[in-house]
Image: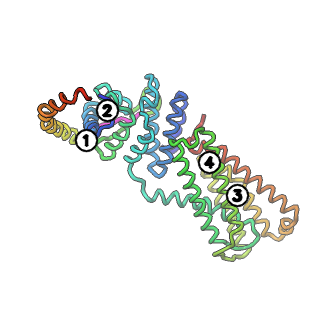
C-alpha cells in the first residue's frame, strides 16, 4: 500500500469491509488485527485508524466483544462478527464486485491511455 | 472495588512497564481522553484506554514505539474515538453540575457559620456555586487545550500553573464573598443555626466514614477546615464561649487555626493535582 493511499476516502470504506471480512474468519483483539491488516497489504495502517473503526462497528452492532484471559496481564478484548456484521460483510463483497465490474473498463480503456500519457510527468 | 476502579488500577500498574518515550506518548493520550471524555461512560473510556495500553505494550515488546504503532496523530485519533462513543446523557452533565455546586455551596455554608450573624445568605450561596462551577469548567478547558497544543511544554510547570490558577481564583471567590453585600438573606434564630451546624457536621462525618477509602485525598484535605469552622460556629453561639471568641486572644487563635487549615488544604491540592488527573501510583 502506498503512502499516498493512507488518507484517501477510497481507503476508508474499503478498510471497514476488509476488517469485517477478516473478523468473520477469526476472533481477534486490537493489536492482532492491526498486524494482520498490515501483513495482508494495508502496510501503512496504524492502531489509531483501527480503534475508532472497531468502536464504530461495535456501536452499530456489527461487532460484539468479550474479554478473554491473556498470557501476560489483564484480560483482552476480542471482537466477533454479529449477524448484522455478517450481512454487512456480504453486502461489501457484492458491492465491491459490482463496482469493480464498472470501474475496470474505465481503467482499461480510458485510464490506460490516461496513465500512459501522464506517466512521464508523474 | 468498582469495575472502573479496577481498570484504572490495572492501567496504573501496566503503565510502569512502558519505556520513557512511550510513557510520555501514552500519558498525553490518557489525560486527553479522560479530560475530553469526562462526561462519557466511564467504564467504556477506561476499558478503551486499557485496551490501547495493552496493545502499545505488545508493540513495545515487538520493538515498535508507541508512535509507530498508534500513529503520529494521537489527538485526531482520540477525537475520532470519542466521536464513536455513545453520546453522554444530559443526566451525567447534571450530576456533575450538582456535585460541583454542592461542594462549593458546602464551603459557603461553612464560612457563614463563623460569622456571628444568624442569617442564611441565599444569594451569596447561589453566586458562589455558580462561580465555582465556572472555575472548574475553566480548568478543564485549559487542561484539554494544553495537552496537544504545547502551550506549556514541561508537565511539571503545567500542573503547577493549574494549581496556582485554581488557588488564585478560589481565593478570588472567597474575597468576593467578603466584599459583596449580603442579598437574599433569611434571618434565623441562634438555636436554629446551632442545630443546622450540628446536622451538617454529622452528615459530613457519615459521608467521611462511607467514602474514606475512595476519596481519601480530597476528604483529608478539607477535614480540618470543616471541623474547625463547624466547631467554631457552634461555640461562638454558646454564651459560655462567646466572650472568649470576642476577645483578642480568642480571635487570634481562631484566625491562626483557620489559616493553618486553609494552607493544609492548599498544600494537599497542589500535591495531588497531577495525581487526580493521571491517577498515578509511581
Q: Which chain carries label 2?
A: A
Label 3 marks a residue whose chain is B
Quarter of the rendering occupied by the C terminus of chain B:
top right
**Residue at which label 4 appears:** B162
Instruction: Report the residue at 21% width, 30% height from top.
Output: A118
Q: Is A80 colored magenta in this rendering?
A: yes
Relative to residue A80, is residue B171 drawn left or right?
right
Element type at mark 4? helix
Asked which secondary structure carries label 3, the reply is helix
Residue at image mark 1: A85
According to the image, label 2 marks what residue? Answer: A4
Q: Distance between the residues labelled 3 and 2?
A: 62 Å
- Asked whether the residues under the numbered discs 1 and 2 touch, taking CB atoms below 8 Å apart as contact, a structural biologist would say no
User: What secondary structure predominates along the stretch shown in magenta?
Assistant: strand
Q: Can residue B24 be seen in this view?
A: yes
Q: Residue at horizontal 44%, vertical 38%?
A: B74
Residue B69, percent from left and from top: 42, 30
Counting residues from the start of the chain, the first of labels 1 and 2 encountered is 2
The nearer-to-camera label among 1 and 2 is: 2
Amino acid at each position: 500500500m502506498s503512502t499516498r493511499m493512507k488518507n484517501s476516502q477510497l481507503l476508508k470504506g474499503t478498510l471497514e469491509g476488509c476488517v469485517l471480512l477478516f473478523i468473520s474468519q477469526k476472533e481477534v483483539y486490537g493489536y492482532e488485527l492491526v498486524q494482520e491488516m498490515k501483513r495482508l497489504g494495508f502496510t501503512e495502517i496504524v492502531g489509531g485508524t483501527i480503534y475508532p473503526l472497531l468502536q464504530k462497528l461495535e456501536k452499530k452492532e456489527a461487532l460484539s466483544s468479550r474479554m478473554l484471559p491473556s498470557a501476560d496481564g489483564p484480560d483482552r478484548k476480542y471482537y466477533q462478527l454479529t449477524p448484522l456484521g455478517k450481512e454487512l460483510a456480504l453486502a461489501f463483497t457484492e458491492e465491491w464486485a459490482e463496482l469493480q465490474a464498472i470501474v475496470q473498463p474505465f481503467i482499461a480503456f480510458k485510464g490506460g491511455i490516461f496513465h500512459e500519457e501522464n506517466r512521464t510527468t508523474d | 472495588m468498582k469495575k472502573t476502579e479496577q481498570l484504572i488500577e490495572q492501567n496504573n500498574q501496566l503503565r510502569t512497564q512502558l519505556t520513557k518515550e512511550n510513557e510520555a506518548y501514552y500519558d498525553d493520550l490518557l489525560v486527553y481522553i479522560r479530560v475530553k471524555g469526562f462526561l462519557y461512560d466511564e467504564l467504556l473510556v477506561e476499558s478503551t484506554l486499557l485496551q490501547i495500553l495493552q496493545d502499545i505494550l505488545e508493540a513495545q515488546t515487538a520493538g515498535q514505539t508507541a508512535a509507530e504503532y498508534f500513529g503520529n496523530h494521537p489527538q485526531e485519533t482520540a477525537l475520532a474515538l470519542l466521536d464513536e462513543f455513545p453520546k453522554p446523557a444530559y443526566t451525567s452533565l447534571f450530576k456533575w453540575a450538582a456535585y460541583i455546586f454542592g461542594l462549593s455551596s458546602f464551603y459557603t455554608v461553612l464560612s457563614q457559620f463563623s460569622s456571628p450573624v444568624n442569617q442564611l445568605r441565599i444569594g451569596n450561596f447561589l453566586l458562589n456555586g455558580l462561580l465555582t462551577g465556572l472555575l472548574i469548567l475553566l480548568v478543564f478547558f485549559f487542561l484539554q487545550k494544553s495537552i496537544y497544543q504545547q502551550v506549556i511544554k514541561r508537565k511539571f510547570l503545567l500542573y503547577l500553573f493549574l494549581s496556582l490558577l485554581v488557588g488564585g481564583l478560589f481565593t478570588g471567590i472567597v474575597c468576593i464573598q467578603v466584599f459583596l453585600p449580603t442579598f437574599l438573606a433569611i434571618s434565623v434564630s441562634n438555636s436554629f443555626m446551632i442545630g443546622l451546624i450540628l446536622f451538617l457536621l454529622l452528615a459530613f462525618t457519615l459521608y467521611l466514614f462511607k467514602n474514606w477509602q475512595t476519596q481519601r485525598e480530597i476528604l483529608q484535605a478539607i477535614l480540618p477546615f470543616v471541623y474547625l469552622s463547624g466547631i467554631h460556629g457552634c461555640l461562638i453561639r454558646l454564651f459560655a464561649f462567646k466572650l472568649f471568641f470576642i476577645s483578642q486572644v480568642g480571635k487570634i487563635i481562631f484566625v491562626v487555626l483557620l489559616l493553618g487549615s486553609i494552607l493544609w488544604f492548599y498544600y494537599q491540592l497542589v500535591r495531588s493535582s497531577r495525581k487526580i488527573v493521571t491517577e498515578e501510583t509511581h
